[in-house]
């Protein structure tokens, strides 16, 4: 999520089902052979399962910039929304400085978070980041969560790992932030959270 531009230089679309336009965007995403590529395959990114899947476009070139969805699909209580599920930022828009990262989050706030929130009504939202298993430091998570809170202070950091899929493996438990639209929603939900030690003892998973 690193875009160093004004949000007014971009626009967005929300998709509720796959179509030819979205599949062209997917193909551009899949043309990058990175470690998260399987997440965006048709079998793992099904637009119809989302409560809206947003794509940001450059206003001047109409090229896709970034994308991500809001998700529940019965995996959590009905009042819980999983934000930025299957988020992806296209390579040409990536930068490395914290300043540009924060600037990019402003674009995401305007063109993904706010539009998806406007067409949904969850009491609480959470978003996650999958751990980099080859790295021994959690510095990436510290930078990410700090940047998020500098742009959207309503999002709160948490300790531990939350479950994002059903299997008892590392990849299905991720670091996370929460945002309550209804006070007390987090306490009422009270999901199981793994400690760092508990997570470290899990197998990696396929």
Image: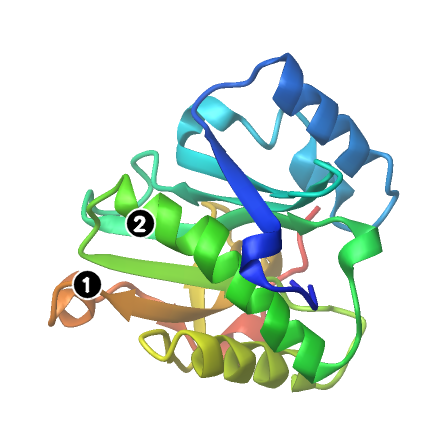
Mark 1 or mark 2, which has the lower sequence index? 2
Classify 32 as above or below 195: above
**Spatial distance from mark 1 to mark 2, Cα to Cα?**
10 Å
* Mark 1 and mark 2 residues within 8 Å of each other at the beta carbon: yes
- Residue 55 in view of the camera: yes
Between 3 and 84, the one nearer to me in the picture: 3
In the image, is 12 to the left or to the right of 114? right
| x and y, in percent, of residue 198 in the image | 50, 75
**Mark 2 residue element:** helix
Q: Residue 31 sits in which quadrant?
A: top right
**Mark 1 residue element:** loop
| x and y, in percent, of residue 42 in the image | 65, 24
In the image, is 191 to the left or to the right of 86? left
Point out the residue furthest to the top here.
20
Residue labelled with disc 2 = 117
Between 60 and 190, the one nearer to me in the picture: 60
């Amino acid at each position: 999520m690193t875009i160093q531009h004004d949000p007014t230089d971009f626009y967005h679309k929300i998709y509720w089902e796959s179509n030819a336009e979205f599949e062209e965007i997917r193909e551009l995403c899949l043309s990058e052979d990175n470690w998260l590529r399987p997440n965006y395959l048709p079998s793992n990114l099904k637009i119809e399962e989302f409560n809206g899947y947003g794509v940001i476009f450059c206003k001047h070139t109409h090229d896709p910039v970034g994308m991500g969805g809001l998700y529940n699909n019965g995996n959590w209580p009905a009042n819980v929304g999983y934000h930025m599920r299957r988020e992806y930022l296209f390579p040409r828009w990536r930068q490395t400085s914290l300043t540009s990262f924060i600037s990019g989050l402003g674009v995401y706030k305007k063109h993904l978070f706010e539009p998806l929130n406007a067409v949904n009504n969850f009491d609480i939202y959470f978003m996650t980041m999958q751990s980099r298993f080859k790295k021994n430091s959690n510095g990436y998570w510290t930078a990410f969560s700090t940047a998020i809170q500098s742009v959207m202070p309503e999002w709160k950091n948490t300790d531990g790992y939350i479950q994002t899929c059903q299997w008892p493996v590392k990849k299905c438990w991720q670091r996370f932030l929460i945002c309550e639209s209804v006070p007390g929603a987090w306490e009422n939900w009270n999901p199981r959270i793994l400690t760092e030690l508990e997570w470290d003892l899990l197998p990696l998973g396929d």
